[in-house]
Each structure stands twice: as C-alpha cells, then as structure tokens.
Amino acid sequence: MKQFALARLAPLAFALTLIGLWQLLADLNLISPIFFPSPARAFAVLEYRLADGSLWGSLAGTSLRMVFGWLLASIAGVILGAAIGSSRLTRDLLDPTLEFIRPLPASAVIPVAILFLGLSNAMSLTVIAFGAIWPVLLASVHGFSTVQHELSDVSNVLGFGRRQFLQKIALPSALPDIIAGLRVSLAIALILTVVTEMQSSLPGLGWDIFFAQRSYRSADLYAGLILLAALGFTANHLILLLERRALRWRTLRT
C-alpha cells in the first residue's frame, strides 16, 4: 500500500516542483513575463474564464470535435481492419493503396476538405477522422491477421460461421492491438482538432490559443495550453480505464 501511494504521489510531486520552479523564475525576473508568464497568471486566466463561463464553451467545442472525430475513425478503423485483416486476398488487394495514402499528412488534407466542405464542423471532423483512423486501422489489421491458427481450428470444430468467429474469437484476440491503436488515435485526434480550429476559426481551445498568440496575450495562451494538456491527460486515462476493464481476462489468466 505504501509503495502504491508513493507511486501515485511521486509524479504529482514532480509536476508541482516544476510549476514551483517556473513560478520562482518568473518572480525573480529570470524569464520574460511577456513571452513566458508565471503560472500564477495563467491559472488566474483560467479562474477568470471559469467564473464568467466562457471556458466551458471552448472546452466543450474542442472536446466534442475530438470525441466525434475519434469515434468515426475508431468505428471505421475497426470495421475495415477486421475486413482486411481476416482476408489474405483483401490484404493483397488493398495493401498498395493503403501504403500510398497512409504517409499523407492529415494537415495536407485540410485545404482539400475546406474546398469541399468549407470552414465548418464537417470539415474539422473529416480531417480528424482521416488522420486518426490510421493507428486504429493498422492495429486492427495486425490484430485480426495474427489470430492463432489453433483458435481457428477450435472455431471450425465448434461449427462457428464467419460472423461468430470474428465476434467470439478474432475480436477478443485482436483487442489488445485495437486498444493500443485507440490510444494513439485519440492523441492524434486532439492534435488535429486544435489545428482545424486554428485554420477555420472554429470556437474552441485551438482558436483561443491562436487568437491569444495574435493578440500577444501570453497568459491566455499558456492557460489554453494547460487546459489542452489536462484534456489530453484525462482522455488518455479514460482509455487506460477502458483497457483495464476490457482486458481483465489477461490479468486473470496470468
């Protein structure tokens, strides 16, 4: 129990130490207050925006775009990954095309998406989904294509059809790879959410940071960065919670 508490408190103590050092350097005027304001100023901005209610709109806008874009990418990635990974013929047919499209930076798709969809939420979701689908898709392909032959033999003995095999055997076997891809995908979704908000002036944390930079309001800029970091941290830990619940059978087996 003592080791568990220490493992929990040590990262928090380290983070607080860094913040305290940041504040000390600012108080001693060893860093520029214009370009690198103190954490007290950044947290004061967050407190003010929390009090006047403007913080919730930006946070909700960014969170919703990130989550919906990530869900679109996740659903499409798992379905396509299952179809490709479970069929050697499909992999051989689609692999050259996927390898051609995969290296394309998602940011390069933004002008094309704006051309067809305008400066809209639909454009943002399209870019987010395009960029975030690849970790899930590739992880799903790998997971479904590496199902042990013994499990396939068991499904044949039990008389499972293709749907039952995918649902009861292949999917649980591929789940560790899929969840790993989901974690990477979520981080990419957050990055692209911020980028599209900056590009298209959509209300959210990305636009707030961009506007603060253009207005030379450095405290507002760092406040937005702190909030983005907190959002990413929370989202990642939710995925870790999902992983622990979905993969409890691995702990029980060991």
Image (cartoon, helix red, strand yellow):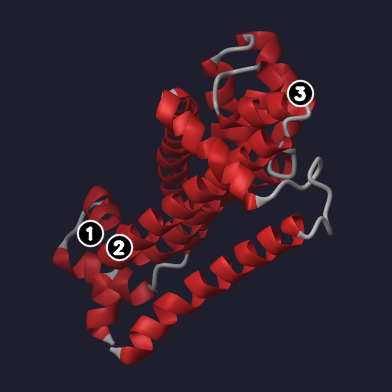
Of badges 2 and 1, the one in the foreground is: 2
Q: Amino acid at mark 3?
A: Ser
Between residues 242 and 27, which one lies in front from this camera angle?
27
Q: Tell me the residue that label 2 is attached to.
A: 172
Question: Residue at position x 62%, y 65% from top?
Answer: 20
Separation (CA) of disc 3 from disc 2: 51 Å
Furthest toward the front, the residue is 28
Between residues 179 and 96, which one lies in front from this camera angle?
179
Q: Are marks 2 and 1 in contact (CB under 8 Å)?
A: yes
Q: Tell me the residue that label 3 is attached to.
A: 215
Q: Tell me the residue that label 1 is attached to.
A: 168
Mark 1 closeness class: few <14, some 14–19, many ≥20 residues within 10 Å? few
Q: Which mark is residue 38?
A: none
Along the horizontal axis of the image, is 150 left or right of 137? left
Q: Earlier in the sequence, mark 1 or mark 3?
A: 1
**Res. 105 visible in picture:** yes
Q: Secondary structure at mark 3?
A: loop
Mark 3 closeness class: few <14, some 14–19, many ≥20 residues within 10 Å? few
Residue 27's image quarter? bottom right
Q: Amino acid at mark 1?
A: Lys
Q: Secondary structure at mark 2?
A: helix
Between residues 27 and 6, which one lies in front from this camera angle?
27
Along the horizontal axis of the image, is 88 left or right of 3? right
Q: Amino acid at mark 2?
A: Pro
